[in-house]
Amino acid sequence: MNLHITGLNVDVGDALRQRIAAKMERVNRHSSGIISVQFTLSADKHQHKAAAQIHLAGKDLHVEAVENEMQAAIDVLMDKIDRAVLQHKEKSQNVR
């Protein structure tokens, strides 16, 4: 799994990179079909936005989260990614 993290108006330090990588391992347990993930972290005056483009085998997903703090935005984003990947996995298993 390729993991790319980009910051817009945000300094993406080692702590944020490690936090995202650790949380992505949880998501990766549910589906081994994740090819690459592109994270974009951005900050406005009072809102922090975390977005992810997930490239799965056969499908691309886009997930976003907006919160008051970057850590909270990342946590909400990871929960949304987890649900989306599980939903895709269940749909692909039902087709077979």
Image: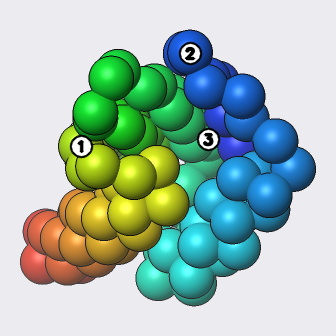
Q: Considering the numbered disc 1 on the image, is that residue within a helix, a strand or a loop? A: strand
Q: Position of residue 91 (x, y in %)?
A: 14, 69
Tag 2: amino acid: Asn
Percent x, y for residue 70? 46, 49
Residue 7 relative to residue 4: left or right: left
The residue identified by callout 3 is 36
Mark 2 to mark 3 CA distance (whole Å): 23 Å
Is residue 8 visible in the rendered structure shown here? yes
Q: Earlier in the sequence, mark 3 or mark 1?
A: 3
Report x, y in % for residue 11.
72, 28
Q: State yes or no: discs 2 and 1 in contact (Cβ < 8 Å).
A: no
Q: Quadrant of residue 25?
A: bottom right
Q: Residue furthest top?
A: 9
64 sits left or right of 15 in the view:
left
- Under tag 3, what secondary structure? strand
Residue that appears at 73% across and 35% down? 12
Who comes first in sequence, dot 2 or dot 1? Answer: 2
Alpha carbons under labels 3 and 1: distance apart: 22 Å
74 is higher (above) or lower (below) than 57: below
Eye-nearest disc, 3 or 1: 1
* Element at label 2: loop
